[in-house]
Image (spheres, rainbow, N blue to C red):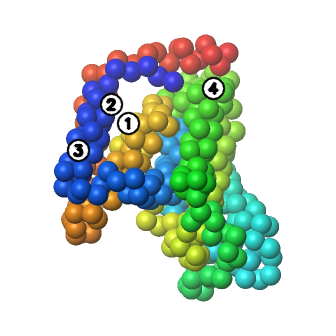
Amino acid sequence: MFKKINLGDIILLAFFIILLIFMSIMSPIFFTFNNIIAITEQMSELGIIALGMTVIVLSSGLDLSIGSITGLSAVVIGFCFSSGINIGLSMILGLSVAVLCGAINGFFIAKIGVSSILVTLGTMVLFNGIALAISRGNAISGFPQSYYFIGQGHLGFIPIQTLIFIILATITSIILKKTPLGRKIYFVGSNPVVAKYSGINITKVLMFVYMYAALLCGISCIVITSRVATARADIGAVYLLQSIAAVVLGGTSINGGEGSIMGTIIGVCIFGVLANGFNLIGVSPFIQTFMMGFILIFVLLTNSISSSIGITTSNKKNLKKLL
């Protein structure tokens, strides 16, 4: 959407290459076929949620409730199935609840005008509380064997969850790059005031953004629960900070209006490689958390510096495409 010569892009790619080389040296099994497949499986769940977070951040927003939406959707699926509803309808109901949660976020942010951080901070607690009330704090299990195929099955040698991630990434990229709606998302994130006076219905754009991101959370919850064979209220909590970090790591501006799905995919890949590599070489989980935080701060500083010297085209080009 924006053409940019960016120091951060070069550093990110260089870092990823160096990381691959380092991990292959530290662990002889890192570049084996089975381990590469394992990495793609590990990054798919985070990747699906990160796609939705990318769309939100591009619109100059932030969603702190995605972990709670994922958990609530998972609990709804588990509760419905354990209540005698077939698994297909249970999945539809779970996805519907996720979209409803996104609509609630979008309404207060777009229609009422409350800050996205304040709204989603509140709904994060609300949705998590509802999930805990439904599940009574317990894990729900006993799904049918066919359900597990989504998170544990393979098509040839490719994991089903990896295929789902690839399909969703392609769809999201097409929406952002090839449709008027995508251009509006970029433009709203870049300059909401100008976008408003240009005739863009910001309310509709933001409603779509938060509902679409919530839908992706619902899909991710299906992948996660079918892999671990249980549904819990906290099943998506770990992905909140990771998804934000992956999006920012991939070069999407936290201020909105600039970024890409490809960048997010690279960010997710880096996190996947780091997590897998650290486990292979026996790095303590506490050290892993420290390293993840250090890398994120480094990338944020790099993006901040590079954005001040990068070359970005004018927003007038996007406006001309919309009119």
Q: What residue sits 80% from the left and 76% below the top?
A: 85
Quadrant housing residue 276? bottom left
Who comes first in sequence, dot 4 or dot 3? Answer: 3
Label drawn at residue 221: none
- The percent coordinates of residue 274 (x first, y second) are 30, 54
Residues at discs 1 and 3 in contact (Cβ within 8 Å): no
Q: Can residue 108 be seen in this view?
A: no
Q: Nearer the viewer, residue 289 or 317?
A: 289
Q: Dot 1 corresponds to which residue?
A: 251
Q: Dot 2 corresponds to which residue?
A: 9
Residues at discs 2 and 1 in contact (Cβ within 8 Å): yes
**Disc 4 element:** helix
Who comes first in sequence, dot 4 or dot 2? Answer: 2
Q: What residue type is labelled 1?
A: Gly
Assign the C terminus to one quadrant of the image.
Answer: top right
Q: Dot 4 corresponds to which residue?
A: 178
* Callout in the foreground (3, 2): 3
- The percent coordinates of residue 122 (x first, y second) are 53, 64
Quadrant housing residue 278? bottom left
Q: Which amino acid does label 3 sit on?
A: Ile
Q: Which amino acid does label 2 sit on?
A: Asp
**Disc 3 element:** helix
Q: Is residue 24 left or right of residue 260?
A: left
Whole-angstrom CA distance, mark 4 to mark 3, is 35 Å
For label 2, the crowd category at 10 Å Cα-Cα, with few meaning under 14, some 14 to 19 and many 20 or more, is some
Q: Nearer the viewer, residue 29 or 301?
A: 29
Who comes first in sequence, dot 1 or dot 3? Answer: 3
Who comes first in sequence, dot 2 or dot 1? Answer: 2
Q: What residue type is labelled 4?
A: Lys
Whole-angstrom CA distance, mark 3 to mark 2, is 19 Å
Q: Dot 3 corresponds to which residue?
A: 21
